[in-house]
Amino acid sequence: MITAKHKTGLVFFPAFDWAISPTHPEREERLLYTQDQVFEEGLLDIDGITEFKAGLVDVKDVQRVHFCVPDEQSVMTKSHFISAGGAKTIADAVMKKKIDRGFALVRPPGHHAMRVVHGGRGFCNINNEAVMVEYLRAAYKVDRVAIIDTDCHHGDGTQDIYWHDPDTLFISIHQDGRTLYPGSGFPEEMGGPMAAGSTLNVPLPPYTSAEGFLHVIKELVLPILDEFKPDIIVNSAGQDNHFTDPLTNMNFSAQGYADLTRMLKPDIAVLEGGYSIEGALPYVNVGIILAMAGVDYSNVREPDYNPENLRQSPQITQNVEKICDTVMSNWRARQLIQNRMKGGKTFDKRRRDIMYDTDGIYETQNETIRICNECAGALRIDSTADTGSHILAVHIPRKACRACQEQGFEWFDSAGSYDAVFLQNRVDDTYQVRKKK
Amino acid sequence: MIIGLDVGGTHTDIVLVGDNGLERKIKVPTDTAALFQTVLTGIEKITQDIPPEKIRHAVLSTTLTTNAIVQNKLSPVGMIISGGPGIDPELFRTNDHYFTVSGSIDHSGKEIEPIDQTQITDIARRMQSDGIRHVGVVGKFSARNPDHELQINDILAPYFDKIFLGHRISGHLNFPRRIHTTFLNASVYPIHKEFFEAVKASLQEKGLSVPIYILKADGGTMHFDASIDFPGQSILSGPSASVMGSVAFAPADKEIIVMDIGGSTTDLAILINQTPLLCPLGIEIGKYKTLIRALNSHSIGIGGDSEVRLEGTALKIGPDRLGRAMAYGGSTPTPTDALFVLGKGDGGDREKSIQGLTPIAQKLGLSVEAAAFEIFDLACQDILTAAREMIGRINSKPVYTIKEALDNYQISPRHIMVIGGPAPYFAEHMEQISEFTALKVPQWSVANAIGTALSRTTCELTLFADTQKGIAMAPEESFSTSIPSSFTKKDALALGHELLTQKALQNGADIKDLDVDVLEELEFNMVRGFRFTGKNIRVKLQVKPGLIHNHQTITDKISAM
């Protein structure tokens, strides 16, 4: 009889009847062999591991995070409601102390979904972690949250959502954007003027192995978490750093993923990518579940695992150490960087082009944030997509000061000719839409 | 006519059912130390003066193997476990002679590491010299590829009398449970075999050579001859006897909670349109979690003989049973004593019950009758709470497809059927204090034996097909065949149906009783390198638990009695 050291919850929602398209990596078969492995190992019989039925999120949960254009139903399938719902189920169980920690093994993933959603990008439509985090903030008054994204691809969606939020620490560890989708996630991307330093990017060279990943966790992530003191640690647990993943070029292993989980001690892990469905996922997931539960995982390994072949070169080790040093100095200099970015301005603006590769949509955003010393600042996004939509999205942050609330209302009320104008007011947790007549 | 015999903790119920309904019923005391005698006496009494040719078959539900496990009186066996990478199989150790050997198979059934012949021969010699005669062999993923278990079997064959292979025991993926299940099968094999061979021989001597079936925990039966290879199937058949007894009198279109109120526990189960719900994997008994198919039944520590006490000013019932009710000479007050005080007892000494409840009544500042009512009411409330919780658990079972998530099928039983204990009193009161309507169970005191007699033979089949490899297999049935790349889920279901029929007939089913149900049907496109390479198909079918086809004439007569 095995007993978990930490009471661990699992939501397993493999969506066996949903695919982006029949041969897409994000297809019905993706978690089939993971299910076989988890069942055969008897993980659900371990005393202290509980499986929960995935709930559904409702539109209101999504509206705390996203501006869906034209609306939620148009950009989300049922699977998105359940996938985010799985994360929410785990979050509830953690907050109600039914479990110490939990893992939402759900699909489809979410970390490429940004604040404005015109469609799917990087297999993602809505951001499961962000929807869950904002639910936690609304329902349980959780304040400071850290999201550590260990997917091989830069978590550009989560980064976008929390770019201006000083209460959310977002650290993305991923394969260097010069060599992999989505091509972003460099150390200089650190967040907006009020939140610089609460976004941190750690691009790793191709063929980084366990040694490199664990170095980042130990030398960079854990010390920063100690300083940031989050109420909750969330892990965006992508599994595509695995040495067998068909879409990426890293050398991580099931043992490495389990070690990472043991060190990071996430309260909630949410599955992201990972497309080596036979050679990696079954073993990585077993490793992560055992590590979360505090059960010995030392004998979990892939059939073709050979640590000798996966050893990283001294050159990679050097690069990894260097990138950690850079990110650490940026983190230490965050106050200075914030001051420099604010630079006596009233507003800060940026223009961005966003590609929705999954749905083939191209979007241009003009973003304006009110520089504020009291709060995270009112945010205005003017978004045009080649679907023909032109919308204005106004976000009043959770702890907005009076002036920023006024600014948000003013932007919303005075908006001119748009297909739709949205107001996401997180102070009173409301969402308004005004459509063109 | 059919004999139904259900061994209980204190009584053994035996019925004879036939064209006239309930032809005979008797109760004999159970002598756990001499179970064979109890069973034999029961059958002799019930068949007295009945011409043997009038008896079609006998179905027995005994506590033989259950007691052996609970009392840890298992015969010594050897276990050979081949796990490979993953959780250390040492953590699933079942007994002293438990050996972990090399060899590994992955989730697709591919061999990762071969077995080591010398290692197994060495272990075989060692176990043989220690006097081991029965062995269980279990490999991880043997339900996907049984080769290693079969190879080990060949090496072991010269050394042992009987070898149980994990892949023959269940098609479900769950290595620890497969280990436990195989262990229990091997461990109860000698007593099971000896017991039923003795019963058969004794009956034959008396000119009664009827086929003997055993009742299983899933509410179905199995011919004794087939049970020799799966003796674990006889474990925990008790709860299913009662549930099947209620099936006999349940309406065809209702969801019902069955409550079997015993001496120390109440067992709850769910019927949906006359079919009992099964538990997802298998029975749990003592420290063993198994893959032995079973009804979804939940047991709570509240029965007629449960201890009644005050904690502060709060009444508490159970979960312990400290002895018999005071009315029958026990020393602790019980719900049965409360019934005696309320004038609903039968055969015992009401004065003793009054004496027993008086101190509680005084502390509560109530008359002894009022206190008795409080106790009776609390027992009913506790059982109802457990029933509602059980419904909640069933409704929160995870689902893995969007269709199921959106259908969100929920059970909401509105009826209860109460058997065992002084069932009518409980049923009447629970109806008054709850949202449930009580349905009558005729002959509730022997419903368990009636259920045993009328249950049909059940079994389950798992078929797995991979069109990329061009193979369909059901390792549990030692079946494997090559298939064309055009093989579909429909073909798999047809093949599964055929294999299930064969299995059911081998297990002693009547061809008219094959009520088949699809438990799982999954079909996946396998894509490797962005290219479609084949289909991965999984189907599970069962002959679902229910009553034999001609039960209606019998049950109608019983209802009309």
Image: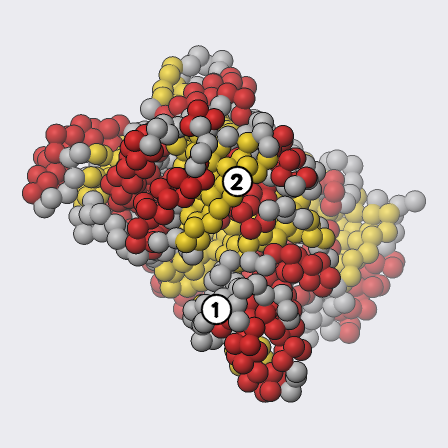
Image position of B368 (left or right of A262):
right
Secondary structure beneath dot 1 equals: helix
- Of the pair B357 and A393, the residue shown nearer to us: B357
- Corner quadrant of residue A419: top right
Q: Residue at x 30, y 50 (%)?
A: B34
Image position of B385 (left or right of A379):
left
Mark 2 / mark 1, whichever is N-terminal = 2
Q: Are marks 2 and 1 in contact (CB under 8 Å)?
A: no
- Of the pair B223 and B48, the residue shown nearer to us: B48
Residue A369 % position (x, y): 70, 61
Image position of A414 (left or right of B532):
right
Q: Amino acid at mark 2?
A: Arg
Secondary structure beneath dot 2 equals: strand
Image position of B445 (left or right of B155):
right
Q: Which residue is mark 2?
A: B24
| Residue A374 in sight in this render | yes
Q: Amino acid at mark 1?
A: Tyr
Residue A296 % position (x, y): 31, 56
Q: Residue at x 36, y 60 (%)?
A: A3
Residue B215 % position (x, y): 44, 39
What chain does badge 1 belong to?
B
| Residue A321 in sight in this render | no
User: Which label sits on residue B328?
Assistant: 1
Q: Residue at x 34, y 54 (%)?
A: B32
- Of the pair A184 and A261, the residue shown nearer to us: A261
Q: Is residue B24 above or below residue A372?
A: above
Q: What's the CA distance linking mark 2 and mark 1?
A: 27 Å
Q: Residue at x 57, y 38 (%)?
A: B22
Image quadrant occupied by the C terminus of chain B: top right
Residue A133 % position (x, y): 60, 60
Q: Residues within 10 Å of mark 1 (few under 14, many from 20)?
A: some
Q: Is residue A173 above or below residue B104?
A: below
